[in-house]
Image (cartoon, coloured by chain):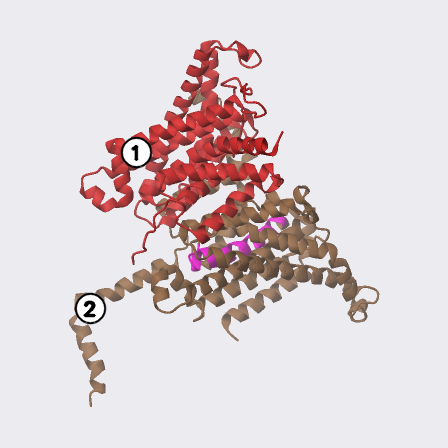
Chain colours: A brown, B red
Amino acid sequence: MSRARAILIGSFIVLFVFALTGEPVFSSRYAYFYDILINIGINIILAVSLNLVNGYTGQFSLGHSGFMAVGAYAAGSWSNHLGPAFADLLAGPHGILTPLLQPIGLQLALADNAVLLISTLFGGILAAITGLAVGIPSLRLRGDYLAIVTLGFGEIIRTLILNIDFLGAARGMSVRATHTNVFWTFGFAAVCIYVVLGLVNSTYGRGFLTVRDDEVAAEAMGINTTKYKVIAFVVGAFFAGTAGSLFGHFTGYLTPEGFNFFKSVDVVVMVILGGMGSTAGAVLAAILLTVLPELLRALAHTDFVPTLQASLESVIKVHLPPLQGLLENRLILYSLLLIIMMITRPQGLFGDFAGSRKRVRSAGAKVPDAELPGMAAATKTSRTPRTP
Amino acid sequence: MSEVILFIQQLLNGLSLGSIYALIALGYTMVYGVLKFINFAHGDIYMLGAYFGLAVAGLVYSFCQLDKFGAISTHTFVPIFLGTGAVMLSAMIFCAIVGVLIERIAYRPLRNRPRLNVLITAIGVSLFLQNMTQFFVGAQPQAFKQLIPVRAIEGLGDLTVLSSQAAIILSTIILLVVLRLIVMKTKLGMAMRALSVNPTACSLMGVNIDLVISFTFALGSALAAAAGILVAMDSPSINPLMGNLPGIKAFVAAVLGGIGNITGAAVGGLIIGVLETMVEGYGFPQLRDAIAFAVLIVILLWKPTGIFGRVEREKV
């Protein structure tokens, strides 16, 4: 068993133990922190999956929220319409597993979790199919065109949902079963990280990196660039869909407005802050950018801000709108982050693949230029055994 | 009303909407021509133009002692013309300065970086402008001052053409002619065209590239500001996010016409405007906002160079 798989299984065990012991107390006593925790998990899934597309494969997508919406609505309507029947089938009075579970009193918990799992997988698969449908035509485009087209697809998905009465249209849709818990949120996050890292670090996954580094060269080497791009896109869309499902089952209410362009921007900011092509960076940025707006909001409601505003206004003699607005609007923070990061540190907080490999490459290139005598001797000696 | 009249009516409405898109699209296409990147923040310049126009309109009204609403019929031609002109010109100048500043602060440091970095910065600038405007003026929509008396023009039979729509189409024609003259007849215009063909050769010929790029941003932003004022004349409600959708639709218009091509942007804008009005008028009002994206996807897949664009070979 590889190390990565051991970590994955280990994290599932930890999560399972937490779900059995700590979670009920934690979720009721510290509901606010529990909310943040779940949001962190959902954002990790979103950021890591988008990083596969934007970071590793270098295809800048601005439509992640569209796939999230597909997943959320698909999973939501699945558990609304088929969930109860499915739960009954499993653990109802005549359910398949009832005889097994009745004695230990777990049948309700199991039914809930099974519905959540199946609906989340369903949402993910539907999002992946959408990703395939969107990806095949649009991934022929590059760079900024691709960004705009994915943005367009995201908006089209949103507009379609707005016009489908079955999904509640503009009224929104309530998801009856709200069972998202830490186990499944972080379980899916762990699977997402495992899959993305596994893909990228496999021989197969080198295809993603070559597509990003030099598409023309990759094509010349016989790599089917479109195939790799579409695969990255579909995997990204799948996990976006699962994140959408978890989000829907967590808030219990979905509106098309919740999946607009700004939601995509949220995720893009996480990927960029963490560093495009760094999964650890994406995870940390997702945590940071979930917690930071909360901290700023808390700061906005202290006495410090009105005092600062009063003193500022007495100096500049201009009446300002309440400064709390600046701190509570996360998009101001995000926009500044984007601009400043791009100018000062475009590789993100945690560096990236391309930068580190470039260093390796240039160091390797310098050796023959320098013509070190020792090196020349070394190459000669290494060749001698070959000559008979 | 017969079918034909209805069609012509839709066409006219579409043309006035399309004029707005055309004016914004010109900014996208010019910036793309010289810098080869999508200035995502362009739609927000249009929004800033409308807000600055609102502020100036307040000053103009109080200065000229004109009535605010209601007694608008007492306006004579000259103050209306001068007042509107003052509002529009000042907004255009203001936005030109903003555009130049944005280029100077956010885009110039990234001149030789990958295009994606500039695109990300542009998204950041766009969000920044929207949210700072929201911070200063509030998120709720505001009523724009009525600059010209809006009423149907008489003597057109069954057709209803509002004076504001006529103003939009006329102003757009004037601005397009002026732009054409600037680009084709002035030295700076020539430099712009040269820069879009080959930046390196252009700088070797002694063209001040920074100046030309700043000028391009100023020109594009001024046109967007004019579009902002014109749209506020027609539908007098403005909000900080008003630049989002028109910005993207105008970008689609620029791509449709062939990005980098000035005539193409104008034609593309009119086509998008007419299409959108037709889709709305003939039964699918909900799909109005999706049609531009559908056009974009179709055009990028079928003819990525657009109507007037020329094919560029990719060099390795």
Q: Secondary structure at mark 1?
A: helix
Kindly identify the residue that appears in the image at 47 percent across and 18 percent down: B57
Tag shown at residue A285: none
Q: Is residue B293 visible?
A: yes
User: Main SS of the magenta segment?
Assistant: helix
Q: Give the distance between the C-alpha atoms of the residues marked 1 and 2, in whole angstroms.
A: 52 Å
Left or right: A65 in relation to A82: left
- The amino acid type found where label 2 is placed reads Pro
Q: Which quarter of the figure is the C terminus of chain B placed in?
A: bottom left
Q: Position of residue A278 (x, y in %)?
A: 44, 58
Per the rendered image, the range of residues in magenta is A35-59
Q: Chain of mark 2?
A: A
In front: B220, or B279? B279
Residue that label 2 marks: A368
- The amino acid type found where label 1 is placed reads Val
Q: Chain of mark 1?
A: B
Q: Position of residue B201 (x, y in %)?
A: 21, 45
In reply to whether residue A49 is colored magenta, the answer given is yes
Q: Vertically, is B266 above or below A218?
A: above
Q: Which quarter of the figure is the N terminus of chain B placed in?
A: top right
Q: Say which quarter of the image contains residue B284.
A: top right
Q: Vertically, is A271 above or below B218?
A: below
Q: Are marks 1 and 2 in contact (CB under 8 Å)?
A: no
Q: Say which quarter of the image contains residue B279.
A: top right
Residue that label 1 marks: B183
Residue ranking furthest to the bottom: A388
Total number of numbered labels? 2
Q: Secondary structure at mark 2?
A: helix
Mark 1 vs mark 2, foreground winner is 1
Q: Vertically, is A359 above or below B94?
A: below
